[in-house]
Amino acid sequence: MDRDATDIYREFGDERLPPGQHRTDSFPVLSKGSTPRVTREEWTLSVSGAVEDPVTLDWDAFTSLGVETQRQDFHCVTGWSRFDCDFTGLPFTTLADHVGVGSDAVHVLFHAADDYTTDLPLDACLRPETLFAFEFDGEPLPRDHGGPVRVVTPHRYAYKGAKWVTGVEFCTEPRRGFWEQRGYSVTADPWAEERYSDS
C-alpha cells in the first residue's frame, strides 16, 4: 500500500462517513446508460487543452509513467459509501507533471468512452488521492465499474470520477459535465452534502 487516503475526511468534517450516507460492503453499479466495451489493448487516454505537451497515451505509455496503490473511501451521491477500497492506478499529479499544465489552466473536463463528461476545478484534481484507477482490490477493474480505467475522487462524490475515461481536457474556464448540466453540484463535497447545484 503506497498511500492510505481514508483519513482525508478530517479536512472536511468530523466523521469518516459523510452526512446523509450509509455504509455498505457491497459495490453497487450505477451508470448513465449502457456499459461500453473497451479493452486494455485498444484503450487510449488523450490529454489536451492548456498543456505544454498534448499527448495520447496507450496502455504501456500510461502505466510506464508510474503507478501506486491507494486505500480510499468511495462516496456515491445516491447515499451509500464503501470504505477501504484498494485502487491501483496513475496519480493525476503524475500525469499533470508529464504534460506540463499551462499557467492559464483552471479547470479539468474528463471525457469517457460512453460520451459521459464530468468536471472539477484543477486544484481538486491536483490532490494526491485523485487517481486514474485500473485495479480494484488487486484485480483488473471490472468493466461495469469503469474498467479498463476510471477516475476515483474520494474527496468528492463519485460521479466526479468518470468511468471508462478516455480524455482529460485542461480548460482555461469552467465547463460543465453531463450531470453538472442537469443540476448536480459542481463542487460535490460529500461532507457538505453538496449533491445538487444551488443555481
Image (cartoon, rainbow, N blue to C red):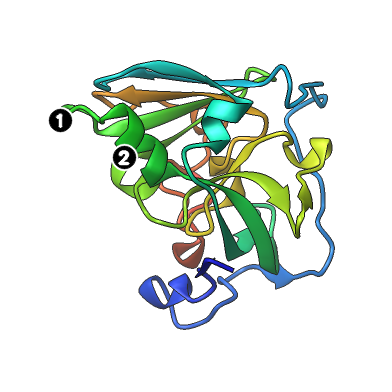
Alpha carbon distance from label 1 to label 2:
11 Å
Are the residues tagged 1 and 2 within 8 Å (C-beta)? no
- Which mark's residue is nearer the viewer, 1 or 2? 1
Q: How many marks?
A: 2
Name the quadrant containing residue 85.
bottom right
- Is 26 above or below relative to 120? below
Residue 73 at least partly seen: yes
Q: Amino acid at mark 1?
A: Ser
Query: Which of the numbered marks, if any, corresponds to residue 103?
Result: 1
Q: Position of residue 113 (x, y in %)?
A: 67, 20
- Is 18 above or below relative to 44? below
- Is 138 above or below relative to 181? below
Q: Which residue of the protein is positioned furthest toward the left in this rendering?
A: 103
Q: Residues within 10 Å of mark 1 (few under 14, many from 20)?
A: few
SS label for mark 1: loop
Q: Amino acid at mark 2?
A: Leu
Residue 117 at least partly seen: no
Along the viewing direction, whichever of 25 and 48 lies nearer the viewer:
48
Q: Position of residue 65 (x, y in %)?
A: 47, 38
Q: Position of residue 191 (x, y in %)?
A: 48, 67
Q: Is residue 162 left or right of residue 46?
A: right
Q: Quadrant of the C terminus?
A: top left
Along the viewing direction, whichever of 109 and 197 lies nearer the viewer:
109
Q: Residues within 10 Å of mark 2 (few under 14, many from 20)?
A: some
Q: Is residue 126 left or right of residue 30?
A: left
Query: Which of the numbered marks, if any, corresponds to residue 122?
Result: 2
Q: Give me the residue at 62% from left, 68% from top.
A: 20
